[in-house]
Amino acid sequence: MSYKVGIIGMVGEEMKKDRWGTLKALSDYGYQGVEGSFLASESVAEMKDNRRRLADLGMETVALSCSQDNPEKLDATIGKAHALGAGLIVTYWGPAENTDQVLKLAETLERMAETCKAAGLAYCYHNHEHEFRPGFGEKGHQCAHELLVANTKTLQFQVDVAWAHFGGEDPVRLLRRIGHRVPAIHVKDLSSDNTRGHFTSVGTGVVNCFGAMEAAAAKGCRWMVVEEDRPNHLTHWESAVASILNIREAGLLLR
């Protein structure tokens, strides 16, 4: 079992004030990667230098994003991913209002995944809760996420465990089922099942985050990425620290 723990978002204000000091502090706490465009630029030389400096801290860029609405930007994103050493490109949202719409989305995502594969990268779709609502497929017995899995081959998935949970899916069961197509998960917790968007530090809420990490790791997942969309009782920075400490305390940080 081998994986790394990264972070997405949460520390944007700290990064604006002191990019490399913030990254050093994250590394000291145990984070091994950052997801997002923190270190991307229009200069290949600058991105390669950022990659080197990040490596000196024992960290990597996990993934960059490209919307399914703008596939024409994919080539540029692939170039930036290569310069930064990111192995993944992620689309973070897609529409899922009816079966035909989801099947069309699957076609678009699969084409983008094939382009990325040809460039030596994996392309992932990141879920929210709406993909797990029932009522899709010929008999209405499937959810949109199941249709995306069934109607693609090259496409990979970045499972957001909190949104899957809030959508009514057990993230552990989901990862046991499709984990072989999941190179990264978002490790995110919720303080409530009843109200959308009540987040909390990993390991302090209602989502089985640690079970999801173990299930993903058992299927070969490479990245466990901590995220909290909005702060709860702690600041984003405090929650970033609390989350990695809880992961360490659970014995799930591999160093």
Image (cartoon, rainbow, N blue to C red):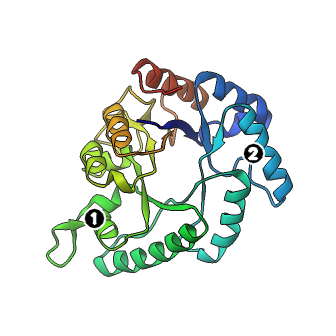
Q: Position of residue 216 (x, y in %)?
A: 36, 43
Q: Which residue is at the front of the view, 197 or 67?
A: 67
- Given residues 186 and 2, the one toward you in this image is 2
Q: Residue at x 79, y 50 (%)?
A: 48
When the figure is inspected, residue 162 is found, relative to residue 255, above or below; the finding is below
The residue under label 1 is which amino acid type? Glu
Of the numbered discs 1 and 2, the one sitting upstream in the chain is 2
* Image location (x, y in percent) of residue 235: 58, 28
Q: Residues within 10 Å of mark 1 (few under 14, many from 20)?
A: some
For the point 36% across and 70% down, the residue is 96
Residue at 34% x, 72% y: name it: 97
Residue closer to the observer: 111 or 139 = 111
Residue at disc 1, secondary structure: helix
x 69%, y 58%: residue: 82
Reading the image, the residue beneath label 1 is 146
Residue identifier under label 2: 51
